[in-house]
Image: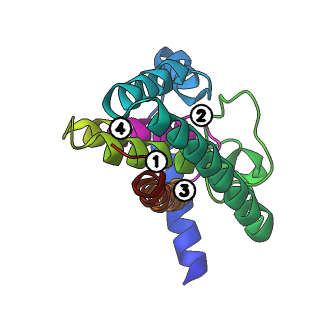
């Protein structure tokens, strides 16, 4: 059963990865870069400040820092536990895939990019939903694009992405609930 799942995951990865072309490689390398979306994060923080105020923003910043640390560390625990090599590190796949990332890394299950981007999307989307009801859909779509970039550049299988996004969504929701609790307890509106 697990072997069949891994086989299907590998086949889907090869298919999706090979949809890429040299024409689009530069764009996907920009999308997969962690620093690319700093302006988006700053806009989201500004929106949170405008809607909730400075005290609440400080709570959100602490919650975001804890959330990203949490998702990163749990991702690393999974990577070290499962030790599933990234596709770019599998010699048998070298002639079947397009590897364009800057580096490969050792283990890939599950994707930190996917978990972090989805956690931010859910967290910010839920906080801003009363003011911008469709923003969460845009942020989740953005997270899917970031996640796909990891397949495109050759460093993650689809199952790495799916599990990372699922974990990120759960983490974003958990930290959203935690921040709501802290706001209700310590910030008087």
Q: Main secondary structure of the magenta part?
A: helix
Q: Earlier in the sequence, mark 4 or mark 3?
A: 4
Q: CA distance from mark 3 to mark 1?
A: 8 Å
Q: Position of residue 102 (x, y in %)?
A: 73, 27
Q: Residues within 10 Å of mark 1 (few under 14, many from 20)?
A: many
Q: Is residue 51 left or right of residue 132?
A: right
Check residue 118 in the rendering and tell me which mark sits there, or answer none.
1
Residue range highlighted in magenta: 140-157
- SS label for mark 3: helix
Reply above or below: 52 against 38: below
The front one of 143 and 41 is 41
Q: Quadrant of the C terminus?
A: top left
Q: Nearer the viewer, mark 2 or mark 4?
A: 4
Residue that appears at 50% across and 56% down: 175
Q: CA distance from mark 4 to mark 3?
A: 16 Å
Q: CA distance from mark 2 to mark 4?
A: 21 Å
Q: CA distance from mark 1 to mark 4?
A: 8 Å
Query: Does the magenta-highlighted stretch encompass residue 109?
Result: no
Q: Are marks 3 and 1 in contact (CB under 8 Å)?
A: yes
Residue that appears at 56% across and 40% down: 150
Q: Position of residue 89 (x, y in %)?
A: 77, 48
Q: Residues within 10 Å of mark 4 (few under 14, many from 20)?
A: many
């Amino acid at each position: 059963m697990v072997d069949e799942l891994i086989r299907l995951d590998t086949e889907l990865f090869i298919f999706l990865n090979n949809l890429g072309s040299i024409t689009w490689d530069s764009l996907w390398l920009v999308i997969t870069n962690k620093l690319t979306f700093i302006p988006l994060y700053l806009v989201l923080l500004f929106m949170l400040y405008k809607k909730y105020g400075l005290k609440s923003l400080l709570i959100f910043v602490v919650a975001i820092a804890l959330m990203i640390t949490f998702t990163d560390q749990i991702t690393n625990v999974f990577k070290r536990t499962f030790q599933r090599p990234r596709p770019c590190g599998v010699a048998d796949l070298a002639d079947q895939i397009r590897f364009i990332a800057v580096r490969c890394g050792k283990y890939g299950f599950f994707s930190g990019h996917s978990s972090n981007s989805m956690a931010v999307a859910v967290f910010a989307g839920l906080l801003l939903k009363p003011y911008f009801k469709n923003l969460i859909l845009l942020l989740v779509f953005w997270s899917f694009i970031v996640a796909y970039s990891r397949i495109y550049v050759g460093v993650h299988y689809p199952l790495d992405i799916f599990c990372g996004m699922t974990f990120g969504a759960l983490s974003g929701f958990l930290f959203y609930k935690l921040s709501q609790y802290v706001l209700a307890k310590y910030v008087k509106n």
